[in-house]
Image (cartoon, coloured by chain):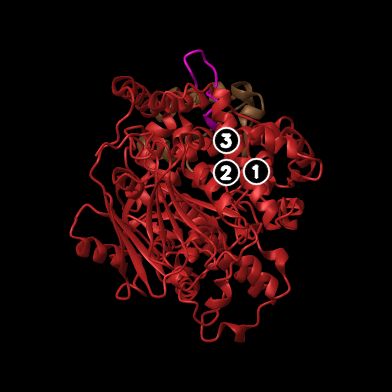
Amino acid sequence: MANELLDVKALRVNLTTGEIKQESVDLELVKKYLGGRGLASKILKDEIDPKIDPLSEANKLIFANGLLTGTAVPTAGRYMVVTKGPLTGTIASSNSGGFFGAELRKAGWSLVIIEGKANKPVYISIKDSDVKINDASHLWGKTTDITTDTLVEEFGEKNAKVACIGPAGEKLVKFAAIINDKARAAGRTGVGAVMGSKNLKAIVVKGSERIDVVDKAAFMNAVKSKVDIIRKNPVTGEGLPKLGTKVLDNIINQSGLYPTKNFQFGTFEYTEEVSGEALVNKGYLVDNKACYACPIGCGRDVVLPNGRKGEGPEYESAWAFGADCGVKDLIAISDANFMCNELGLDTISAGTTIACAMEMYEKGYLPKEDLKDGPELTFGSSESLLYYLKKIAYREDFGDKLAEGSYRFADSYGHPELSMSVKKQEIPAYDPRGVQGHSLEYATSNRGGCHVRGYMISPEVLGVPEKLDPQSLEGKAGWVKIFQDLTAVIDAAGLCLFSSFALGADDYAELINVGTNFGLSTDEVLKIGERIWNLERQFNLEAGITPAEDRLPDRFKDPLPDGSQKGAYSHYEEMLVEYYKIRGWQEDGIIPKEKLEELGVA
Amino acid sequence: MVKINFFTLFRLELGIKNIDIDIDKKIKLRDLLYLAEDISKKKFIHKLIDEKDGLLDSAIILINGKNVHHLQGLDTIIKNGDEIALFPPGGGG
């Protein structure tokens, strides 16, 4: 069968009835939303009531490939899981790389829309157009590595790819992840809990069709030129391949932005012990790994002295278990990352939730007896880190409280102010007080605290595409809007955000056009990003997430106590008015009807 | 004395973690970097400065934690006691 790029097909699987349907997506919708995060968000908003309980049968879970996923375009291995998220109550979309998405596209599927709830554990098998719902009772309770190996063997295709949940998803941990290829995570927003709520353990897929484009010669020329740009760029051609994402540890720490002990400080005195350089010098790093069609290869293959091995740790994960918890043991930090992959947990929320509990314990807000037989929750304790991670995943003892995420946990003890979260999702590894644009980006993110909805660290700290003063407010609202819109395009195209260290909006427009003949201008491509952003925002507003939640924890109004940014605090509130205006929204943050009509979202 | 700390790929590929340089008077950053190359006998300036003698946007040079892009760039005056951090272009997230 032909597998054309513009033949966008959806598989609709109803787990309540067992019905499996194959649908074609209207090309006009593809032109408006491309795919991935865009197309799936549109479908979700059209098909569910934004007010539903995220863990109810009424929620839908959409695995969505980007428009270019599975093609030869560099970094085109990304897929998105879109649903209503249990951690935030917002629209949730969580991105992952590896090989699962590309395999799914090669099987002919751009989207898999999961509906309803199975009455027992099941998994879905896909071999091109042969799709089945299968019993997964024997897999329930298993970690993601065992689940993956078992399914690949049972399926009888050694190159089959698996996306699955671990015990954390089954137990409805609010920040459970979906893990594909054993170590790649659709990590954030609790998409794994939604999968668990549907009794869906896994999807295993094998595809056999290459994807055809309109003009193959022109397409491959464009691909070659972008690969060349990525390879020649010092960030994507050298820094990321050689050091991975942990190239950032010392950069961010030296810049005074490395959140330490639940964001109480901006520098970590043991950074040298846990940095990317240390991972190399201590001999733990064995090799680097690349996702599908990726010339960067930022993944890490690590073997620890205790014999444990796996992928990672990534910058965010190592920070969450390291500086944020005050832990300086790189072995424990790496092990915590591996455990999260096996148990199916989001590393950022897991680490930051434990860090929150550590601060509460040290401040005397958390009675020792509540920990049952567990170790004391003190900053720096690698023992407690590993102990409580497991307890969270299985919702055992005190872990059951932590499994609700830092906001609900801290709130239950009367101290919600100690949750370092936005819209109830934990903030990642950059203290917003020292980077004003990034601070605004955190506050306005449609999926709660997040760094990959508009990575302002790039211009404000890393000088890409140009160096902006991190403390200046001037023009930052406009920068945030453009970064958010462009990121939505990259996500909808199915490309990795890291490609944007080397490529710009014109490059993405060219890649989209050469594959589709859409003939879009760069402005029109950015308009697609704006449409996606507004659609997500409108979903949230209809879900009852008001603009009052475009806010940071009060801690960030207080000055940083240490480091090179000592004295700095977040000015996000001063920029919000301008941001709403630039977005064409009302002063109160509501999207006016005219804007929705202009974008075709209404 | 001025301490220059090398990070990320500089540290791994040049094989040096830091060097101390004695300066008897204030010196511009540009001159200090060339002095550091002479003393260390390692080449690293090409990762920070372009062929027109301009500071690369993505070069990260911190003086006491402050990025020189927002000071006086390569003309920033360095004085005794300053600590300098050098990073070739890098990014992740």
Q: Amino acid at mark 1?
A: Glu
The residue to which callout 2 is attached is A453
| Residue A440 sits in quarter | top right
- Foreground: A570 or A381? A570
Name the disc covering residue A441, or none.
Answer: 1
Mark nearest the camera among 2 and 3 is 3
Front position in the image: A469 or A187: A187
Residue A215 appears at what percent x and percent y?
Answer: 32, 22
Tell whether label 3 touches label 1 (CB within 8 Å): no
On whether disc 2 and disc 3 are found on a single subunit, the reply is yes
Q: Please give the name of the residue rendered at 55% of the width and 86% of the height, measured from the top-left corner.
A: A372
Circle 1: element type: helix
Whether residue A232 is situated above or below residue A118 in the rendered picture: above
Q: Nearer the viewer, residue A20 or A481?
A: A20
Q: Earlier in the sequence, mark 2 or mark 3?
A: 2
Identify the residue at horizontal 33%, vertical 39% (top origin): A70
- Is there any visible trace of residue A419 in the rendered image? yes
- Residue drawn at x 51%, y 37% is A29
Q: Is residue A306 visible?
A: no
Residue A120 is covered by the magenta coloring: no
Q: Measured along the vertical axis of the image, is residue A301 above or below residue A229?
A: below
- Residue segment shown in magenta: B49-60
Picture quarter containing residue A298? Answer: top left
**Which chain is in brown here?**
B
According to the colouring, which chain is red? A
Separation of residues labelled 2 and 1 (CA atoms): 7 Å
Q: Which of the labelled discs sits on residue A529, or is there none?
A: 3
